[in-house]
Amino acid sequence: MIDDSIFLNKKVAYHTLGCKLNFAETSAIGKQLSDEGFAKVRPGEQADVCIINTCSVTDTADHKCRQAINRLNRQHPNAKMIVTGCYAQLKPAEIASIPGVDLVLGANEKFNILDYLDQPVGIDNPKIHRSEILKVTDFKPSCSHDDRTRYFLKVQDGCNYFCTYCTIPLARGKSRNASIEETVQMAKDAIAEGAKEIVLTGINTGDFGKSTDETFFDLVKALDTLPDEIRFRISSIEPNLLTDELIDFISNSRHFMPHFHIPLQSGSNEVLNLMKRRYTTEFFAQKIATIKKIMPDAFIGVDVIVGVKGETNELFEKAKAFIESLDFSQLHVFSYSERAGTKMLEIEHAVSNTERKRRSDVLHELSDKKTRLFYEKQSGKTAQVLWESRHNGDKMVGFTNNYIRMETTYDKTLVNTVKSVTMGDWNDDKSALKSI
């Protein structure tokens, strides 16, 4: 039993890097500490504890983590500095060597952070606490509320795919999840708190059910029966797990939005093979065509990685041509980053950093073109918009069910409400469509 009094009135600072899953998990950690008497530090206050939840998807992510550690150490020089997350799981000794770091907790240990808070660091209490993540079988649920209107519900963790460029299984472990019953209850709890929109997040979200003998489709159907006014979005789903049955269900869903985020990673079958992805470009194109056939206005975001080892100039041009042929709404472009322990390091033909940037720029330009075209096709149509609290001067923003960013004159009474609007032309800086 933890003595609550030792934490009463203690101040804690949080810093989260990386994906929405990390933010949901930081929120769960924050609730634990709040329940034990901790208060979130306010601007100008000194923290007693700093918790940094890290990402390690690229070298840039690692660099940003180190910068955050050093910055918080300068801002809160007397605080106990605790670093956790993917970077901590993959490179604990590297983090432990950074001046000011007191504790390094692995991906599983982050959820037991209270067990370490009052322990002195020394010979009997090592600085690093880290499990063999591939042996971890328990699932830690979490849900977070961002500063807008969305909740992010963690429905799944880990990945069994072991793509050649990726360290996620080494950082997160194998695929696991809570039951449908437990997950639906978490959604109900978020709705009771005032959620109007919930994003289902995970490392390999569509693999939900691996550890409970259920399926992601079963979860979607269960959530769709909720009687409340709630919108659900799927953060990301692998193309091989996005079944035609699921697509058809979403097209007629009460709650699930016509908004898809699908990792492609490369538009070249040769590169997909090098990556050990589980589909072909032909299969991917069929998924996009199926969505657009029954949901012509659906928003489709696509992940792409450029500059992986083995991606020759010829293969990139081939990939670019394929990507350009797809009817998508936006690209999320990532430049390849060498990661220790991955099979891709064994592949010949490295792409220079300069060329990686050039390829990234080319695809970003293509993405902008596709996004503009998608938005312009929506002008004049009527849609349901969930208005957010954030605003710029006298303008506020919101998103349609198919993820069009809208702008209107700020009205506090609209915040966290869904209203029917007619979509107009671009706003002044072409960042959103104006509401008519």
Image (cartoon, rainbow, N blue to C red):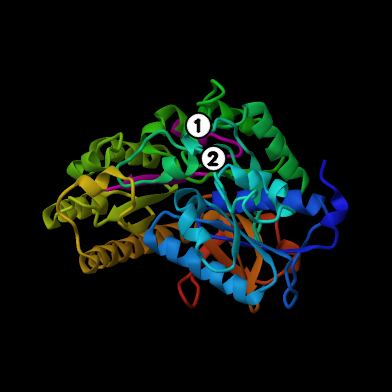
Which label was assigned to residue 131?
2
Instruction: Name the image quarter holding residue 394.
Output: bottom right
| Mark 2 and mark 1 residues within 8 Å of each other at the beta carbon | yes
**Callout 1: few (<14), some (14-19), or many (20+) C-alpha neighbours within 10 Å?**
few
On whether residue 217 falls in the magenta region, the answer is no
Q: Nearer the viewer, residue 390 or 147?
A: 147
- Looking at the rendered structure, the secondary structure element under dot 1 is helix
Name the residue furthest left.
Answer: 314
Query: Residue tagged by mark 1?
Result: 135
Is residue 119 positioned above or below 285 on the image? below
Residue 395 visible, this angle: no
Is residue 138 positioned above or below 101 on the image? above
Inter-mark Cα distance, 2 to 1: 8 Å
The residue segment tinted magenta is 247-266
Which label was assigned to residue 336?
none
**Residue sitting at 20 percent across and 66 percent down?**
355
Q: Considering the image in quadrants, where does the N terminus appear?
A: top right
Q: Nearer the viewer, residue 424 or 263?
A: 263
Q: Considering the image in quadrants, where does the C terminus appear?
A: bottom right
